[in-house]
Structure formats: C-alpha cells, structure tokens
Image (spheres, rainbow, N blue to C red):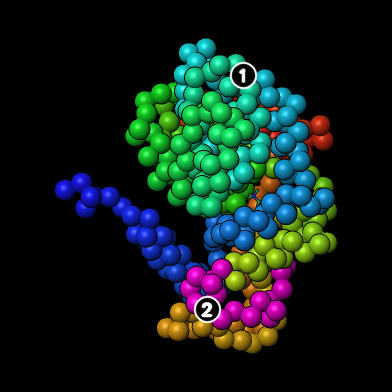
Amino acid sequence: NSSSSKTTLTDISRHQTGAFHKDVLTGLQSNPKYLESKYFYDTTGDQLFKELMNCTEYYLTDCELEIFSKKTAELSAAVTDDDNSFDLIELGAGDALKSTYLLNYLLEQKVDFNYLPIDISSNVISNLTSNLPETLPNLQIMGLNGEYFEMLNKATASSSRRKAVLFLGSNIGNMPISAVLEFCKELRKHLSAGDKVLMGMDLKKNPKTILAAYNDKGGITKKFNLNLLERINRELHADFDINQFDHYAMYDPETGSCKSYLISLVDQVVHINERAYINFLKDEHIYMEISQKFTLSQIEQIARDTGFKPLRHFFDSKEWFVDTIWQA
Ligand code: AVJ
C-alpha cells in the first residue's frame, strides 16, 4: 500500500517539534545552560537575520556578496569542470542572494545542472522553490527542508552526477572547531573524488570589527537571540519573560571564537509545556551561539585533515572574508 509509506507534512512537523522540545530541555537542564543556534531560524528568526545582514556592523554578507558579484566567472569555473552536467547543492541556502549570481551565470553559459538548496527552515525552502524560478526561468531546482546530512543523503541518493557543494556565509563557523572537523570528514564521505566544495569562511581580523558585528548598536543581534526564547514560548508553550534576559557577546582573538549569551537578570523560574520548569539564577547565562573566525593556514589545514585538497581562495577587497574551493 503506497499511501501508508508516505510521510505527511503533519508527521514531519510533529517530528521536528519533538526534536526541538527534546533539544531545548536537554540544553536548559544542562549546567551550564545552552541552546542550539540552528533553532534561531523560524519565520521571525529568518526575518531578523535578514535585518542583521543589512546592519552596517554586520560585514560578512557584504564581503561575500562582493566576492560573488565581482568574481562570478572565476567562481563558476572553479566549481564546474569541462564535463558540464552536475548537481549544485547548497547547505543552509537562506535567501540564496549570493548563489543567485552563480546560478544566473551558469544558466547564461548553458551549463547543465540541478540546484538543490538545503535549509533547516521550511519557510526558506518554500520561498526559494516558489521565487527563484520566477527570476531564473530555466533553473532546475529541488528544495530540501531538513538537517544537512539527512538532506545530503536524499540529494546524493537521487543522482550519480558530479557534485559541487556550497556552504556559504561562514555558516560553518556556527560549529565549535571539533565539530567543524567532524562535519568536513562527514561531508567528504558523502562526496566522490573530484567533487568540489565552495566554503565561505570569516577570517580573523581586528577584534573590535568582529565584536561590533555581533553586538550591533541597533540591538538586532539581541532580538535575534531573544527570538529563540520567544520561539520556545510559541512552540513549546513556555513562559519566558524576555525582558528579564540581556544579550552578551564576546570575541576571543586567541581562539578566534565569537560567542553569544543570554544573561538572566533576576532569579526566575520558567515553565515549559506545563510539565518542566527551569530555574535561573540572577546573572546565570545561556550559551547561545559560536561564530568561529579562521586564519588561512587553519583553513588549509582543516581541508587537508579532512580529506580535501584546497584549490583556490577568493577574497573581498578588504580580505576580511574568504570563499575557499576544495576538491574531494
Ligand atoms: C548564519 C553563520 C552567518 O554566525 O555570523 C549573525 C549567524 N549570528 N549574527 C554568523 C549570526 C549572529 C551568522 N551565520
């Protein structure tokens, strides 16, 4: 019976809410407390991230946009081979603003490729699959909503073509360095020799420039972090009072890690789903996010240690950001 093997949309969202609930409880029942930054991206979170990308202090998007708009042809040449037909997979595609330069160029060059954007936000995937074909009518697109490797499995199972994987925006920086290495090894396992990876990574630079990007004067980063508490209220029926939490960001030039926290301003109890309650002490923190910054030699080391060959680096004019090309 074919209908019994189909997963309905309700099943999927119920499954996702279950994982969200479990991860939130695990994080908030740990000591020290933490939440996973991948959960920032609900509909409001997507909107706030768009606002963040437009903040003057948030330089990352501008730098990478500069690279994609000025070096489109070179980037395209670096991810394609002469054998033309291939799958272009994008992890954490977001609004695909940067990759659209690439897509547009590849279509102009009549390259035969499929675009497979993967994103944790269902909102992002439905927007991409309905909007992109309007601006790029000849684009062959298949959106995949879910976790990176689950969706990468789906993408690779459905095709045996050569692959190029985009992982832009320093999304990889949202993992601690040990997880970066695990991630790259796992990514390599999903690829075949000769496949390419185009990875956007934020570089170490003046610590004040970095800190300002994660501590913007307009308070969008603060809202972006607090939205996760509001998402927990909305989806898990919790009673966080977001006025009783402040945002704190710090950058450590030694390790290159920029970290975000929410700080409880008072002793307080928060209820989740009527069944669980979480105690907060005044000044206690919730660790929210890491945004790792890298050096070039570190980037090449990561590539080699995880089974890739670093091929080429593309920089913006300030050399604050790099789009690096690796070959499996
Ligand atoms: C989604 C990885 C590009 O870490 O810079 C922005 C997310 N967090 N401001 C980053 C984010 C706070 C962002 N990336």
Q: Is residue 182 magenta?
A: no
Q: Residue at x 23, y 50 (%)?
A: 3
The percent coordinates of residue 20 (x first, y second) are 46, 65
Q: Residue 48: which quarter of the image? A: bottom right
Q: Secondary structure at mark 2?
A: loop
Contact (CB < 8 A) between labels 2 and 1? no
Q: Residue drawn at (31%, 52%), measured in percent from left and top?
A: 7
Above or below, 266 against 39 in this view is: below
Of discs 2 and 1, which sits in the foreground?
1
- Residue 61 appears in which quarter of the rendering? top right
Hey, which quadrant is residue 203 in on the image?
top right
Please tell me which residue lies in front, 299 or 158. 158
User: Residue flagged by tag 2: what amino acid is it?
Assistant: Ala
| Amino acid type, callout 1 | Glu
Furthest residue toward top: 82
**Image coords of residue 189 (percent x, y):** 40, 35
Q: Examine the rendered structure and indicate whether residue 229 appears above or below residue 118.
A: below
Q: Which residues are magenta?
A: 231-249
The answer to whether 7 appears left or right of 233 in the picture is: left
Badge 1: residue crowd in 10 Å (few <14, some 14–19, many ≥20)? few
Residue appearing at x 21%, y 53% in the figure: 4
Give the residue at mark 2. Answer: 238
| 46 left or right of 182 in image | right
Q: Position of residue 238 (x, y in %)?
A: 52, 78
First of labels 2, 1 by sequence position: 1
Res 40 seen here:
yes
Residue under label 1, please give it: 108
Q: Seen in the image, is 153 located left or right of residue 237?
A: left
